[in-house]
Amino acid sequence: MIGSFLLALALSPAASADDVSVAARVDTDHVALNEQILLEVTVTGDRTDLPEPAMPSLPNFQVYSSGRSQNVTISGGKVQSTIVYSYVLVPRFVGDAVIPPITVEAGGKTYASTSIAINVGKPSQGGTPSGPPPSTPRANPTARRPRPSGGGNGAPDLFVTSKVDRPKAYVGQQVTLSVRFHTAVELLGNPEYVPPATQGFLSEDLPPLRNSQLTDRGRIYYYTEIKTALFPLEPGSSPIAPAVVRAQVRQDAAVDPFAPDFFQKFFSQGLLAGQTRELKTEPIAVQVLPLPEDGKPSEFTGAVGRYRAKAAVSKTNAQVGDAVDLIVTVEGEGNLRTAGDLKLPQMDSFQVYDTVTSLSLAKKNDVVTSVKTYKTVLVPKASGAVRVPGIPFSYFDPSAQKYVQLETEPIDVQVAPGAARPSASIGTTAPAPGVVAVASDIRYLKESAGAAWVSALTGLTTRRLPHALPLAALVLCVGLSAMREQEARDPRGQRARKALLRAKESIHASERARKGGRHDQAATLLAEAVQHYLYDKLGPDAAGMPFHKALELMHRRHPKIGEERLSSLRGLWDELEGRRFAPRSANQKTEQALADAAMGHLEALDRELRS
Amino acid sequence: MKALLILLVLPWSAHAQPSTDARALYQSGKYADAARLFSEEVEQRPNDAAAQYNLGNALYRSQLLGPAVASYLRAWELDPRDEDIRFNLDFALRKAGEGLYPDETPLPLFLAFHALSAREAEGLQWIFWWAMLLGGSLFIVSERRREALRVPLLALSLAWLCLAGWWGLLAASTPKDLAVTVAPRTELRNGPGDGYSVGFTAPEGRRVSILGEKEDWLEIGVLKEGVKGWVKKGSIEKV
């Protein structure tokens, strides 16, 4: 039956003008009271943000949304979007009914389908496997007309209950609301269900309805259960308002057959006269927890549930300038209606155009599942092997109470050079083609190590202490230079200061001469060492002065020199004079003693002069 | 002098070619593994600008913008004349919301000023320092070479003065404790602790200077905007 949908409406006349159309179709136009109708409303347009259809008032039916599916195609730069909304219609009364035109507002215009006529017959015996909430529950077809069963224990004829599957939920986590309508009496038609106000929730119906029976306080009740998936939008305490069920029951007024007005009452009320009973559920508060901030990935855009993601491209071989569709599909348990756009990574090899999304919702086993498809047109900028990187997607898993990060597999696309554009005409002086910026990216690795001299130069900066060495050398040279200048300015003083040094050099020269067997020269050098010492100390005043006179002059200038020192020097001089002029009388040993004595006397005299 | 020779010779002897393994990993898209090998190269040759540059490339490809900027900055500090290093550093900095080239400074002037890095200018001025002082020593002790040495010594002294001044200006224009934000969204708090309110947030890869330290917190200043605040130590990487 599902496969043989009856097309009830063609495109509306106004639709073709603006490329927006709305169509409605039902799976059957004849239905029993205990059966249901599947209504599909298809909205097609050249935009992705097509509005939802506005359902007209359908007093003869109870309407439940059973999902939506969307398909988006991009061709030649144009977007074509088709959204199919599915509804389950449960008839309430026997007779002819009409589904009025279903409208869509787009671009300031209203597009509408045509009406659909439906014939509702009496309940069938077998019913349909997915039958609506009838007064004759599918589970027990023979008990189509429940009769009052007892009721002596204060058990009501009708009552409703409501409950949620979890009192606490995270933002975006599914909360399933179950409303049960119980009846122990025969109903005049199917009850009317008014869903609760669920401000602060995104609401999705969860058809089909469940029918069964139970025994409560001694009475058999037939019940219908209606489930709704709610998705909290904000943290805090969110209330679910009471749901309302209105049912028509047979009026229980007794008619006295012996009363005078029996016939009047009998015909005015009728045997099938009914009354409307309105039942309300208790309000329910759901505590909504905020999504944790810790560990929230940067690419998280609000998806809550459990998902998987995959990516594909429309072609893996393309030419420069071709359009390649990148299709990222995220599917799983949860409602992706409030999830934001993907955060695409940098793709410098492509010109990236806007992403269009399509969302399909399905409801299986009371769980809302979503399939969200993100289509992005990529145009390769340059030829070669280019890679579409992994696309990240994150969601919050409320059962594990943590964020999960997914990334699709990278996709390689082989891009061939685009067809060359022929020049306008041969021989014309068309401007030479310039360099065209295609993509901006970092430059490639360096093949060789950096310049070695740079490293060497940088190495000079690691230790700074050795750089004090040239400064020390300069200071040393400056000192030496100063000394030299000093000598140049005071030659007499310099001579006096170096007198002992020169005397020692002469004594050493004398020793070398003596060891060489040149005794005369040795004696002369030794005598000159002593004599020149005195002359160096006394300066030009002593020039040509005999040794003894010079010694006296020394004594006059330096009276603190002891007499003993002077006499020792005189004695030494006399001996040296004797050695100079009578060398044969000397021997090796006495020459050595004289040299030692000369050295000792001069050093002692120098110390006394400096003291 | 021996120490100087060692300093000059050591870097030359330690010079080697980049790893082919790291290059192959980079080529095959295994950027994280390539970054690990390039990092080992950097440890072996910390003064090699190319090694730092290659590490920066692998880090950038691994989506680690902050560490990549830090590596590029180190490479630029070693060899500011390399056009590839300049390009990639500017590219990465622009991803972080700033750029290498200041708007208010003409590009030729900026490039001329940064023709030498601070360390290169320092190294060169040390060379001229040695030449100038040793030449000066010779000038002092050797009277007969004085005439021949006078002009070269003057030129050396002027060159040294210029290089030392250049080094000083480069050092002064570079923050002493330069660092880069490595967290995707670095929160700058108004005090050294989680209890203080967040004053600013900075994106990954921004250049900052370290102004102070207290326990696990660092006071930083964001160079471009001039704002400052406290961040946890792990959220920045020193250059």
Image (cartoon, rainbow, N blue to C red):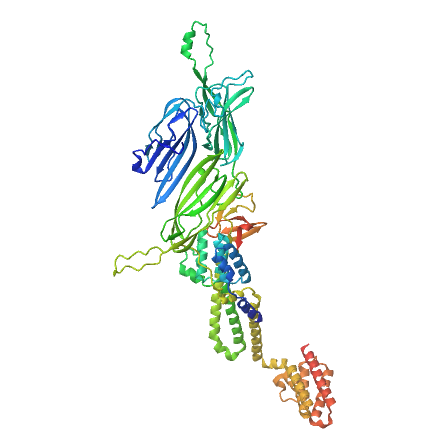
Residue at x 36%, y 35% (from the top left corner):
A43
Q: Position of residue A305 (x, y in %)?
A: 50, 39
Q: Position of residue B10 (x, y in %)?
A: 55, 68
Q: Position of residue A292 (x, y in %)?
A: 53, 40
Q: Nearer the viewer, residue A83 or A335?
A: A83
A310 relative to A56, above or below: below
How many labels sit on residues?
A: 0
Q: Nearer the viewer, residue A67 or A168?
A: A67
**Quadrant for the N terminus of chain B in the image:** bottom right
Q: Is residue A222 left or right of residue A60?
A: right
Quick check: can you spot residue A123?
yes
Q: Is residue A439 left or right of residue B157?
A: left
A127 relative to A404, above or below: above
Q: Is residue A430 left or right of residue A41?
A: left
A535 relative to A119, above or below: below
Q: Position of residue A12 (x, y in %)?
A: 31, 33
Dividing the picture into quadrants, the one containing residue A95 is top left
Quick check: can you spot residue B97?
no
